[in-house]
Image (tube, helix red, strand yellow):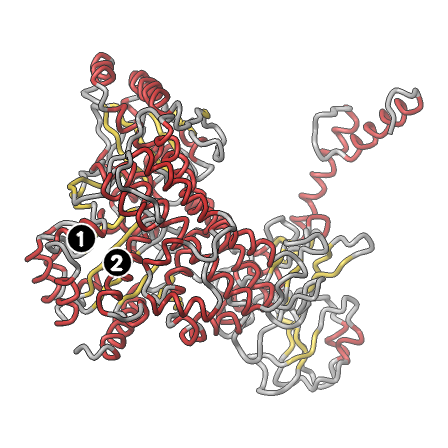
Amino acid sequence: MKSVIVRPERCVGCMQCMIACAVAHSGTKTLYGAIQEKPRPRPRIHIGAGLYREAFPNRCRHCSPAPCYYACLPGAIHTIEDRGTVIVDPGRCINCASCAMVCPFGVIRYHEDVFAPPSRTVAIKCDNCIERQEKGLIPACVEACKTGALIFEDVNVALSEKTSEVSRRASVGISEDKVQPGNPLQLLYKHKETLESLSRNEIRI
Amino acid sequence: MADREQYRDMTITEDGKLMLEKASTDGIETVWDRYRKQLPQCGFCELGLSCRNCAMGPCRIDPFGEGPQKGVCGADADIIVARNLGRMIAAGAASHSDHGRDLVEVLRKVSEGNAPGYEIRDEEKLKKVAMEYGVEIENRSVEEIASDLAYAMEEDYGTRKKALTLLNRAPEKRRSLWEKVGITPRGIDRETSEMMHRTHMGVDNDWANLLLHGLRNALSDGWGGSMIATEVSDILFGTPKPTESTVNLGVLKEDEVNIIVHGHNPVVSEMIYQAVNDPELVELAKKKGAKGINLVGLCCTGNELLMRRGIPMAGNHLMTELVIVTGAVEMILVDYQCIMPSLGHIGACYHTKMVSTSDKAKYPEMEHREFHPENAKELARELVKEAVENFTNRNPGKVYIPVEPVRLTSGFSVEAIVEALGGSLEPLINVIKEGKIRGIAGIVGCNNPKIKHDYGHVTLTKKLINNDILVVDTGCAAIANGKAGLKVLEAVSMAGEGLKAVCSALKIPPVLHVGSCVDNVRILVAVAAIANELGVDMSDLPVAGAAPEWYSEKAVSIGAYMVGSGIFTVLGPMPPVLGSSRVVELLTSGLEGVVGATFAVEPDPEKAASLIIRHIERKRKTLGLS
């Protein structure tokens, strides 16, 4: 089963995923239409800034077991097993914010929504774009991501790819092949050379 | 690369579809491929809500209200959208106006005798324009007049004047309206420069004030830079007269040396035109196994040559890559504007020699051979010779010229239209009054891969002429209509009864080609002349403009000077303004009370036609015409 996997080291903070998310959860499904809707749709993915102002795409991890599910007293939160998706039913939500209190990621928001009962504030969060997936589309945030910070993949497939990636880098390190880009060890060599030449007074800063 | 099914959604043209197929086979990436790779495009930018004007940013306003509503400096959505639009206008106005300046430079060098090969082709127009500029013409040589006129035009670019000279062509009512609103353009470069100043952080933070300056900046293009470009081009190369030619990729010849000129400025292409007619070079071509030298145009450089010399036209903006894919082009010479940086790479896949010619426009994988008025004649000859010699490098196995060319009539300058009407605009005004022609629509602008290639132009044009609206067109729109066969006498069969009768009597097509994109000013001049004749303002007339497939910043400036001159204008693609409802409101309705015209946006050309027809009928009613 595929899920949205976040690779934060690739995020450039363009926030295109936020725009795409809001549009995908609008009534009109177009950007120009969405910004004129009342209530205006809002993104379910949020970009935070880290210690070094680096961007971090934050979205519902669809935990299993999901703390929000257990915290929801009116039973508004349920799971669609075959999609690995935790869903809020806006019709049952009583805006008590219990789910937010237990959510480890802080990805739930409270506002009106075009698909909720009119004029009611309800809990809104990522639904893995189930509506799009049923049409054979991938989640809107992944489609919008230009850098591969968000991918839609089976988590084990993604991780085995990462294993190969790491293995290749390690073997480059062993063979001391300095041409390979992206080799973290290479950076060390470079610094080593610089430090050495500094100590020999060959270059000045 | 797209598959065959998709080509049908990409263009309505037969040559386009067939060449897209060949591009795919040859492994050539096109503008459509790159467009798809960009999707989805940046939503903040589409709405005009991103700002890169300073290093406290970049900033974005969240259109959904959750995130920031102000940039670091404090600018809100209205200010950011207005600033961005202002800079688009400035870039467009600068492009046209700098093009105009290059022509004035040639005019000056001709007057000094420093531009071999160039001459004053239209003395009558030189004198007419010189008089408008207050230049003495009695008992003076052509060179003396040209020298003073060039100097006077250069003054229009500067800061010494209170108003541009050619504004005098506009009706008195329009000029006093500009004065009252405070948007009389004072200097061509001044307004662009001031726009860059105003949009710097911490200067003009009143969105409405910024937009008004946007209109003034655009008017400095329409009644300044572009108008000078057109007038000086006519003076140097001749005022266009109706001429027959052909259009689409079928204009390339399998057994001749094909040379293409692409860009906007006629300064280089006119010299190439002279060189291809050099008997020695034609003889050389024969020696190399070709039957002759075939010069064809692309885009507006092509339009300039088509209007004045009847040089065939290969295609418009979205065809500029595909023309190389024919494998039949020995050389492409480019000047500037709308030349995709991808062209050089495509040229490298064939034998085509790619040559850039302007000191201000260099491109990847093109050979740079700089033209100046002093060396143009010599260099043109040299380059044509190299193109001829390149003929033997052509790989016949790679050559594919997909279609037969379509005929068209071009060359309808205002002067030519007046001549066709028997010496004055009165007959045209009369048929408009009688209602045989309901009104006039200018269809202008580019191609844009967001709109099916040529579909916007051709669909809109057909619907308008069918409703007895005379269409005048320029730029890529004109080429689209030419390819669709709308620029021949027989096209009257597609016109409504009234327009059909008028065009048949005058022996003109229902769609008149008035030139390149700087030549949109010919539309301004004609509309102003009609308004003057009737003693009304330009905004009172049953006239409209449309840019159904626009992409360029120049088109934004054109749209804004049309609206600023009182002409209702419908855009196809949405400009990046929707992030501010106030800006949208001003552009689409508020401006009516300011300059007597507004913008509308309608990507569906059928619906755009209805908007234009409704507008024209409303204006007729106000004028008391049935």
Measure the C-alpha gap from mark 1 to mark 2.
9 Å
Report the chain holding disc 2.
B
Residue under the point 18% across and 20% down: B291
Q: Residues within 10 Å of mark 2 (few under 14, many from 20)?
A: some
Residue B465 visible in rendering: yes
Q: Image height check: is B303 above or below A111?
A: above
Residue B125: percent from the left, percent from the top?
25, 44
The residue carrying mark 1 is: B417
Question: Residue most toward the front?
Answer: B139
Quarter of the picture holding the N terminus of chain B = top left
Question: Residue most toward the left?
Answer: B505
Would you say B33 lies left or right of B173 here? right
Residue B6 visible in rendering: no
| Nearer to me, A84 or B165 | B165
Residue B506: percent from the left, percent from the top?
8, 55
Residue B338: percent from the left, percent from the top?
42, 43
In the structure shown, which secondary structural element does the residue marked by tag 1 occupy?
helix
In the structure shown, which secondary structural element does the residue marked by tag 2 occupy?
helix
Q: Residues within 10 Å of mark 1 (few under 14, many from 20)?
A: many
Q: Residue A181 occupies which quadrant of the picture?
A: top right
Residue B492: percent from the left, percent from the top?
11, 57
Q: Name the kind of residue labelled 1 in the image.
A: Ile
Report the chain holding disc 1.
B
| Nearer to me, B419 or A96 | B419
- Disc nearer the start of the sequence (1/2): 1
Would you say A119 lies left or right of B572 here? right
Quarter of the picture holding the C terminus of chain B = bottom left
Q: Which mark is drawn over residue B304?
A: none
Marks 1 and 2 in Cβ contact (< 8 Å): yes
Q: Which mark is drawn over residue B526?
A: 2
Q: Name the kind of residue labelled 2 in the image.
A: Ala
Residue under the point 50% across and 48% down: B158
